[in-house]
Image (cartoon, grey):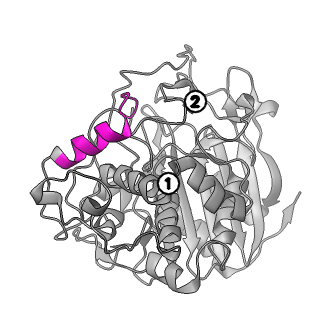
């Protein structure tokens, strides 16, 4: 199901980020999704008009000019600690004509990594670990070539571990994932170069569990979601209203079901996905996450500075100054941090100002329409315009 390669030219084209893909490609081989024969995007109608909590006319004009008429999803933007725009467009469930809104629940895919990074920093604050610790202090046995890989290297994609180990929905346990990771062939010597690795973030989820003594989602729920006021984010702990969860659609417009329709363990996704992708959330909750990262709600000032530091350059031609933080990509001037998520079906971008003065979260439940549009290609001009508008000043709006 997931994109099989890290497409650097596409992801670095975003003004604010690398569009880091969620996990390894499954080719849609092992899912239990309802595969309804949807004929494609619905034609525009009154019931598919934008639905909103708050609309900024200048932002809405940018969306109307930049996005295809038949896109579906949700976008929230904030400036100076206040939401300026939050609106859904199109259908989150086309078969049942359920409109997308700011309360629609989406798979945020690789944006999960930002939460994993915050969890690691929470454990450092609690004295449970240090980012300089080696993985061999938490997971064992570890082969000689990987024994000195550090938590810092996992966080910054400099561990040399491969991008993925298999299908997101393979029924892989934590122990099986760890064993496969430590036996995998390195793509580079640890600490020598940036090489995007979902495996590294699954190992971080294992470290979180081992260091904290509780499971990954529960740790996030207690240490991140609750303090931030995020009541609609998680894997299985929230009491999901199924109708609020967006159905995902392939490039032909055929339904791929909801994220929870796929093969998961009882406590969340299996370990090829856990920690590196698969969290579900809403636009409102992603705004709450942004606010909680803007002060000491989750992390103290020094730890936040460590997380948003440009630790390792991407080293990709034409992108001097782009660097990897902990769970975020840092822009050359250091003012914006971002992470994106994409799979064969959905696509989204999250942008957080390191100073806390603006944010944008944008998500669609159909990434591509065959022969017509690809949202990864549209994302760069869209984000450029949105950030410029947020920085230049407020527009007119309505509720």
In x, y percent, where is residue 324? 36, 71
Q: Residue at x 60, y 40 (%)?
A: 71
Identify the element where label 2 is drawn: helix
Q: Residue at x 50, y 59 (%)?
A: 212
Neighbor class of circle 2 (other Cα within 10 Å; few <14, some 14-19, many 20+) is: many
Q: Is residue 267 above or below residue 228?
A: above
Q: Quadrant of the C terminus?
A: bottom right
Is residue 181 one of those drawn in magenta?
yes
In the image: residue 23, left or right of residue 337: left
In x, y percent, where is residue 40? 56, 23
Among the 4 quarters of the image, the one containing residue 170 = top left
Residue 213's tag is 1
In x, y percent, where is residue 204? 38, 56
Most foreground residue, 115 or 123: 123
In x, y percent, where is residue 383? 54, 63
Residue 260's tag is 2
Neighbor class of circle 1 (other Cα within 10 Å; few <14, some 14-19, many 20+) is: few
Among the 4 quarters of the image, the one containing residue 98 = top right
Q: Quadrant of the N terminus?
A: top left
Mark 2 or 1, which is nearer the eye?
1
Q: Earlier in the sequence, mark 2 or mark 1?
A: 1
Which span is picked out in magenta? 168-182
Disc 2/disc 1 C-alpha distance (Å): 26 Å
Q: Is residue 243 above or below residue 129?
A: above
Q: Evaluate whether residue 41 shows in this view.
A: yes
Callout 2–callout 1 Cβ contact below 8 Å: no
Most foreground residue, 354 or 9: 354
Is residue 272 one of those drawn in magenta?
no
Main secondary structure found in the magenta portion: helix
Q: Residue at x 41, y 46 (%)?
A: 22
């Amino acid at each position: 199901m997931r994109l099989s390669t890290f497409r650097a030219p596409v992801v670095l084209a975003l003004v604010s980020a690398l569009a880091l893909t969620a996990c390894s490609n499954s080719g849609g081989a092992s899912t239990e999704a309802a595969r309804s024969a949807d004929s494609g995007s619905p034609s525009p109608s009154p019931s598919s008009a934008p639905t909103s909590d708050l609309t900024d006319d200048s932002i809405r004009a940018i969306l109307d000019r930049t996005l295809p008429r038949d896109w579906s999803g949700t976008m929230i933007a904030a400036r100076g600690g206040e939401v300026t725009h939050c609106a859904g467009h199109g259908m989150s469930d086309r078969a049942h004509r359920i409109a997308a809104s700011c309360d629609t629940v989406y798979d945020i895919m690789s944006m999960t990594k930002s939460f994993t990074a915050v969890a690691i920093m929470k454990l450092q604050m609690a004295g449970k670990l240090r980012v300089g610790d080696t993985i061999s202090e938490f997971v064992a046995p570890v082969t000689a070539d990987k024994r000195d890989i550090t938590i810092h290297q996992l966080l910054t994609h400099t561990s040399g571990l491969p991008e993925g180990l298999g299908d997101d929905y393979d029924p892989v346990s934590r122990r099986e994932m760890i064993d496969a990771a430590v036996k995998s062939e390195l793509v580079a010597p640890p600490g020598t170069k940036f090489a995007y690795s979902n495996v590294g973030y699954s190992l971080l989820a294992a470290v979180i569990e081992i260091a904290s003594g509780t499971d990954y989602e529960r740790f996030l729920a207690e240490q991140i979601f609750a303090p931030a006021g995020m009541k609609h984010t998680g894997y299985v702990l929230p009491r999901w209203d199924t109708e609020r969860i967006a159905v995902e659609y392939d490039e032909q417009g055929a339904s791929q079901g909801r994220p929870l329709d796929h093969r998961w363990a009882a406590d969340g996704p299996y370990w090829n996905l856990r920690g590196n992708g698969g969290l579900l959330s809403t636009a409102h909750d992603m705004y709450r996450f942004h606010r909680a990262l803007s002060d000491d709600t989750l992390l103290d000032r020094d730890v936040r500075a460590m997380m948003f530091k440009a630790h390792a350059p991407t080293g990709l031609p034409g992108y001097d100054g782009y660097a990897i933080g902990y769970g975020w990509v840092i822009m050359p001037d250091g003012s914006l941090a971002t992470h994106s998520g994409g799979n064969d079906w959905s696509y989204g971008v999250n942008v957080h100002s390191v100073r806390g003065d603006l944010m944008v979260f944008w998500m669609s439940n159909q990434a591509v329409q065959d022969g017509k549009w690809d949202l990864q290609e549209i994302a760069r001009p869209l984000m450029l315009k949105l950030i410029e508008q947020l920085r230049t000043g407020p527009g007119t709006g309505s509720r």
